[in-house]
Amino acid sequence: TFGDDTTVVYVLGGPGAGKGTQCANLVKDFGFVHLSAGDLLREERQRKGSQYGELINNYIKEGKIVPANITIALLENAMAKSPSKRFLIDGFPRKMDQAKKFEKTVCKGKFVLFFDCPESVMLERLLKRGKTSGRVDDNIESIKKRFVTFKETSYPVVEYFEKQNKVKRVSCVNSPQKVYDETKAIFNELFK
Ligand code: UP5
Ligand code: MG
């Protein structure tokens, strides 16, 4: 378990909202380490000898949430290996059981940075990225499934943290720079 000297910010938002893009900016300006749960799962999928490769691939293609134990272990390992005490946990937690388990056994999150984006905008971004990303879930069938999971399973996590007044919402429809200006203002108040 990580204590009070560790800062965890959860970065949430629908598929393609721009979580990864904005995390890269925050890393440069505020010395956070960026841990994307999706990236860690994709890495584990490729790892030789991983017993979860096929399972992870199937969940990702179907837009479903990989069992919490797997993702939490990957995050906890990455945190333990890192010399930093500041983490942006991107794309996690996206199911209530993950949220409760991580908060109880790994670290309490300081707040949720939530990137708000209409589905039509996210769809356009993902289809565009799909032309070159090579991601198995950047196709229309998988994208539709990811949207359903986001609405039914992941958004309730945002509402859960909202009840604790722990959500900072940023609209993600404008240019990456505009979105970052707003995001940076939030971080400037808290971390400068
Ligand atoms: N772009 C970004 N910002 C833009 C802007 N302001 N204007 C115009 N274009 C913008 O951005 C997406 C695309 O849009 C890029 O081409 C970018 O240039 C452009 P990106 O920053 O990549 O958005 P992001 O929100 O990170 O999108 P991503 O596709 O990564 O989101 P997902 O949440 O769908 O993907 P993730 O990798 O987190 O998860 C994938 C899957 O892993 C899940 O569906 C699930 O199956 C599994 N998973 C779990 O099972 N458990 C977990 O805990 C996490 C993931
Ligand atoms: Mg991402």
Image (cartoon, grey):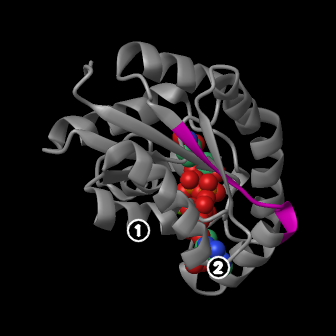
> Is residue 56 among the parts visible in the rendering?
yes
Q: Quadrant of residue 110?
A: top left
Position of residue 77 measured from the top left corner of the image (x, y, whole percent): 26, 36
Type of amino acid under label 1: Asn
Mark 1 vs ligand 1: CB below 8 Å = no
**Are discs 2 and 1 less than 8 Å apart at CB?**
no
Relative depth, front residue between 116 and 185:
185
Residue at image location 32% in from the left, 54% down from the top:
47
- Which stretch appears magenta? 112-120
State left or right for residue 36 relative to residue 162.
left
Q: Is residue 96 above or below residue 79?
A: above
State left or right for residue 135 relative to residue 64.
left
**Residue 39 lies in the magenta stretch:** no
Mark 2 neighbour class, 10 Å CA radius: few under 14, some 14 to 19, many 20 or more: few
Q: Is residue 68 above or below residue 118?
A: above
Kindly identify which residue carries mark 1: 25
SS at badge 2:
loop
Relative depth, front residue between 172 and 61:
172
Relative depth, front residue between 141 and 9:
9
Residue found at the very far right of the displayed protein: 120
Q: CA distance from mark 2 to mark 1?
A: 13 Å
Mark 2 vs ligand 1: CB below 8 Å = yes
Residue found at the very far top of the displayed protein: 104
Kindly identify which residue carries mark 2: 175
In the picture, the quarter occupied by the N terminus is: top left
Type of amino acid under label 2: Ser
Mark 1 neighbour class, 10 Å CA radius: few under 14, some 14 to 19, many 20 or more: some
Relative depth, front residue between 112 and 35:
112
SS at badge 1:
helix
Q: Quadrant of residue 151?
A: top right
Position of residue 121 measured from the top left corner of the image (x, y, whole percent): 80, 71
